[in-house]
Structures are given as C-alpha cells and as structure tokens.
Image: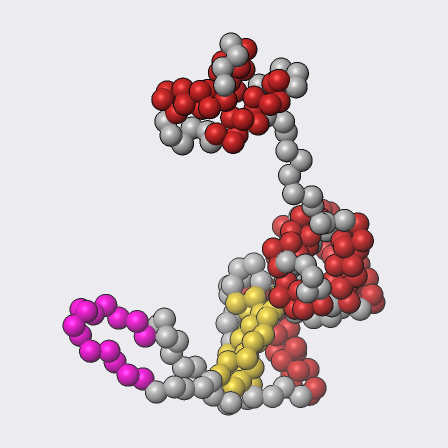
Amino acid sequence: MQSVILFLNAKNMKPAEIHRQLCDVYGEDAMSSLVVWRRVQLFNEGRENVHDDLWSGRPSVVNEVLVHAVEEKIRENRRFTITSLSLHLPQILWSLLHEIVSDKLKFQKLYTRWVPKMLTEEHKLKRQAGVLDFLTRCSEEGNNFLSRVVTGDETWVSHTTPESKQQSMEWRHTSSPNEVKFKQTTSTWKIMCTVFWDRKAFCLWTSCLKAPQSMQVSIATHLKNCIVRSRISDTACLTRVLW
C-alpha cells in the first residue's frame, strides 16, 4: 500500500485525494488519513523505502543482576514455589519469575529418590566385594555355583488388611444404589514372614511374631538342614515353621 502512496505522490496528488482513492479500492479501514499524510511527508523528505522499519520491541527487564538475585533465593530454599518466590521479589511478575527459573537458570523440580536403607561406606565396600566374589565364582563354576545360591526376603503381614476402594468396585447400573462400607484401618497385630528359596523352589518359609537372636540361630540351623535334605533327595524341600 505504501508503494501506491509513493506512486500517487510522485504524480503530485494531494494526501486527501490519495486517501480517497485508497478507501475506494481497499475499503474504509485500509488506512487513516493521518497515516497517509505522514507517509507522504516522509516520501517528500527523500524516503524511498516502502517497507516499515523493524521494531526493537519492548526492552527485556531480565538482566544478570535479576537472574543472580533469583538464584540466590533458590539456593536458600530448594523447596520453593514460584508464588513464595514472588513474595520475596514483588517487583517481578509471576510469569517472568517462571521464565527465569526454568529457561534462564535451567532448574527443574525433582522428587527425592527413595532408597530402602542408608548404606555407609563400609556397607558399600562389603557389598561390592561380595558381588565381585559372586561374579568370579559364577564365571569359573557356571551353573553349579548358581545351584548352591540361596536367597531370602522378609515382610510384615497384618492379621487384617482392609479392602481397598478399588477392590470393592462392582459393575452396576446407573440407577442402582451405592453400597456403603465402614472405614477400616490396618490391624496392629502382624507377623514377620521370611522366605528362602534357590533356583529350583522354596527351601524354607517361617512366620513369627518376633524373632530374637536365639530364634534367628534356630531358623538358620533349620534352613541349613532343609538345604542338605534338598540336595540329597534332589527335590524341593518346603517347610513351614510357626512360632
């Protein structure tokens, strides 16, 4: 459209007449008379470019000082939220804080990884030595070594485990009444179940309320006897001991 204004202005046409012809061709909302007058004035001053100049846009308020201030607040409290961070920096918009945290500082919110036990350096060294010993013997002896490995696990089993909400779901019509169940808690009475097995089958299953040191020795002795009988008879030996 500025090319048209430049052409008509070269023919010494008045700005009002140029605006009228533009409205006749492109419609009433094509360009206002004030804009046409400004374009004619620029062309009369020697401008030849018919394209608009590039806009620099709104200047960004993000700078190194602001990024450093946000990083310092984050390092003071790793469990921050953007909302709590905005309370310490009220002059910064919430969306701008989120941009600084995620785009500029590259922070991500991660959960703490759960591990069953806190191992010390001594525990780690012992486990490493045991694993290396197993790998060495397995490479030397093959399946014969694996046949002699017995592993075990233990867990607490409650006397009464309440039915979960998902387990109580049933297929019903939309008009059927909903069943009501009372809220139940897990029973405080529980027993410790310990299971040992090898590559063939279970070797020993024990369950007891509490296993003192003497009982642990008894379980280990009974497990040894079960393994010996299993090796002699070449059959699985399943024994249940209840205290």
Instruction: Locate residue 234: give its quadrant.
Output: bottom right
The outermost residue toward the top is 11
Main secondary-structure element of the magenta-colored stretch: loop
| Above or below: residue 19 compared with residue 182 | above
Residue drawn at point x = 63 percent, y = 29 percent:
54
85 relative to 203 in the view: left or right: right
| Above or below: residue 127 compared with residue 223 | above
Residue drawn at point x = 60 percent, y = 69 percent:
152
Closest to the observer, 74 or 6: 6
Instruction: Locate residue 175: give its quadrant.
Output: bottom left
Closest to the observer, 13 or 198: 13
Q: Where is residue 165 in the image (x, y as percent from the top left)?
A: 37, 75
Confirm whether residue 140 shows in the render. Answer: yes
How many marks can you see? 0
Closest to the observer, 110 or 127: 110
Residue drawn at point x = 28 percent, y = 83 percent:
180
Closest to the observer, 120 or 164: 164
158 relative to 55 in the view: left or right: left
Q: Position of residue 47 (x, y in %)?
A: 64, 18
Q: Position of residue 94 (x, y in %)?
A: 62, 59
Residue drawn at point x = 50 percent, y = 90 percent:
189
227 relative to 36 in the view: left or right: right
| Above or below: residue 93 compared with residue 214 | above
204 relative to 63 in the view: left or right: left
Confirm whether residue 106 shows in the render. Answer: no
Q: Position of residue 243 (x, y in %)?
A: 55, 88
Task: Verify whether residue 79 appears in magenta.
Answer: no
Task: Provide the residue span drawn in magenta.
Answer: 168-181
